[in-house]
Image: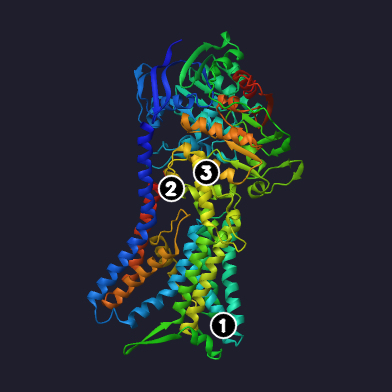
Amino acid sequence: MTTLLQIQNLSKSFLSNRVLRSINFDVRKGEVHALIGENGAGKSTLVNIIAGIHKRDEGTMVFNGTDISFNHPLEAMKAGISLMHQELSLVPNATVAENIYLRREKRNRLGFNDWAEMNREAAAIFERIGIDIDPKALVGTLSVGMQQIVELAKAISLDAKLIIMDEPTSSLSEKETVEFFKVMRDLKARGISLIFISHKLSELFEISDRITVLRDGQHISTDDISTVTADDIIRKMVGRHLGDLYPVRSSNIGDVVFSCRGLTRFGAVRPTSFDVRRGEIVGIAGLVGAGRTEAMRALINADKRTSGQFWIEGNEITIGDPGEALSYGIVYLSEDRKSSGLFLSFNITDNVGAATLDRYTGSTGMFKQSALRDKAKDFIGRMDIRPPNEAARVVTLSGGNQQKVLLAKALDANPKLLIVDEPTRGVDVGAKSLIHARIRELAETGIGVIVISSEMPEVIGMADRILVFRNGGISAELDNHQGNVTQEIVMTHAVIH
Amino acid sequence: MATQASFTAREKGSIWRYLAAFSSREFLLVLINLIIFAALAFARPDVFPTWTNIKAVLSLMSYDLLIAIAMTIVLIGRGLDLSVGSVLALSSVVMAMLMRDQQPIVLALVLGLLTALACGLINGLLIARAGILPFLVTLGMMSLARGVATVLTTGQYISFPRADRWFSDFGRFEFRFQYGDTFYGLPLPLLITLAVITIFALLLTYWTPLRKIFYVGESPEAAHLSGINVVRLTITTYLLSAFFVWMAAVLMTSANRIGYANYGIGAELRALAAAVVGGASMAGGVGSIFGTFLGVLMLALIGNGFVLLNGNPNWQQATVGIVLIVAVGFDALRNIRGRR
């Protein structure tokens, strides 16, 4: 088999963050090449560079015998490389044919769009791949599976030689996946190459010819799929050592402070039940899209849940909205610090008091500005927030300091259960361990803490107990008192076998 | 060393930003107002600096001021209220018709207020509960309220000669003072307006329920997660807006001694221009009553200038347009730079 795409020594940094280091990667003609790695391993960056969305810093890319360097995705498309995004990029209110020929409509002799011709060609493509889709149907009326096939048809109509698929099956039902694979095999038989990103190991083994593992922006291995096992792949994905960076675990874990039974949210969270004890840190692990954040938001009813029962300190409670959750001492800190955590153009003081304004209010409703300012100064000292100026606007702070402000806001609400979602995303190493230490100190004061993190070392390093989420529900509960849970174990429960 | 250096740099940046955000806009507006004032005083020393002229500017300004405050409070909550001018007309017409029919004045005032609040409530519910864009909802209300007012009056002035005298008197009442040989009159409506907005400005800063509106406007999602009732507060902003519009309607109806369906045409644009000039943002979360006051004053002085300098008064409307575009343009730039 001949090589279609050959990448050598490819590197890429975003600001000072090196996301790809000297990657070597090749795709042969007519093969399905699986790409797998932990969240943040660099898969998406790699395929975005191939598809002309990002530019590489270093390295060479040879495609179909010529050196390539794309400035724009359209150039990559013209060269024969198509990228199917994780989120569909179709226009729901346009027809199938309109979507397939978007921005490159065929014209008739008068210069008008020739829809008859486009509909005919689209129909021909669907006939070729043996799927029955009406080119005149609105895309929004099709199932997600069919929409993926439309994406594929778009790639085919472009005469793509290489189609990159970023988790195309993540939202497909089993039946739809079977259909989808049928089309993939058909494309392969026509000599089209496919790069296939997925977290579902069983699918990778079913459809791909070779598999490449990325980890921390580095190329770990490329193997023929017949020569490796699922365990091999998992080991290669995580093989990293945990330093002693994490605070010492607690020895005094108390009674159950919070219980959740049968929490569901239609289409996102399957029945989920768990307890959190006083002084305990419960880690929630899982891959992106496993329903971790969705479950926690449904818990405080920030997104309407379908069902769920909750107890705090043994008393059953109803949680109608985040405000009510707060009144019971349940505080959720969003993963999206900037848009749903902080009030960016407000100063530190006003952010610290955001969830507790009523406490800084007299019986007449008058706001006690100076009381809140003193409290903010107190937090700035305790958490080492920089600059130590309570009037500094939060937008001017670094990511780590913003996270500390968010934590201060939560603490000010005197939480009994603190849920922190991705507490160290985009935070530098020094601030990271400080945040870890603060979270552990909080737990030591008797608060139950839930830490959601996509960084497995963080979950394992912090948590006394780990809940692994998969496909919208808990797939495993792992005792981590001794800190002896390994990344392999977590990953085994996180990926879909 | 490296962290130390970057830390000081960051702190320097934040103080600079803080000073800029805190003082520059209001300071600049005071300066602009002074420059316009000085220029007009220089150009027409015989007319402009007289008390009669200044009183006229300030009196005419009080309606715009109340409406601009209405707009400011909605903008702070990340909304927009284009219906202010029309609701003013509808409320005025309702009150005038009731008084014409010799209903008690208090009843007329109450029903006028309820009319305005009903409009505000419909705006608020459609925006906060149904999630329709404020622009569309209030544009519809703008047309609806004006239309109803026109239908009720068939486009005629509604006078109320047999209503109690005190209502039509108070809109023109002046406290008179003697200083030297001249008498100075302080119009009562202007005093009421200034008193109300001063109290409101204080409440907006120091009264927690109103303070929360800033949080809603700055980030509705974060406010929701912080336990702030975003829906209720958003509706509240439209009700407050309706209240200030009603006040303007009362003063205008009283001073002119008629209700009229064409009151307040174009008022929404002047209010928007004044509020944005004064520091409110289309992106929500900011705005100040004092800033809006300075914005309204600026537009009023410019308008007075056109009259005194024998310019074509129609240019006044074009000026409002220019001010609005420039102010909104700066606002957009500020959002692009400031929030990244």
For disc 3, the marked residue is A379
Asked if residue A116 shows in the view, the reply is no
In the structure shown, which secondary structural element does the residue marked by tag 3 occupy?
A: helix
Looking at the rendered structure, the kind of residue marked 1 is: Met
Closer to the camera, A390 or A401?
A390
Closer to the camera, B184 or A119?
B184
Q: Is residue A270 left or right of residue B48?
A: right
The location of residue B234, given as percent across then percent down, is 56, 58
Do the numbered discs 3 and 2 sit on residues whose CB atoms are within 8 Å?
Answer: no
Discs 1 and 2 lie in a common subunit: no
In the structure shown, which secondary structural element does the residue marked by tag 1 occupy?
A: helix
For disc 2, the marked residue is A392
Do the numbered discs 1 and 3 sit on residues whose CB atoms are within 8 Å?
Answer: no
How far is the residue under mark 3 from the one under mark 2? 14 Å
The location of residue A187, given as percent across then percent down, is 52, 21
Q: Please determine whether, in this image, residue A187 is positioned above or below residue B173.
A: above
Among all residues in the image, which is located at the extreme top?
A227
Residue that appears at 50% across and 31% down: A432
Q: Quadrant of the C terminus of chain A?
A: top right
Asked if residue A59 shows in the view, the reply is yes
Residue that appears at 46% across and 81% down: B188
Q: What chain does mark 1 sit on?
A: B
The location of residue A409, given as percent across then percent down, is 55, 45
For disc 1, the marked residue is B97
How far is the residue under mark 1 from the one under mark 3? 60 Å
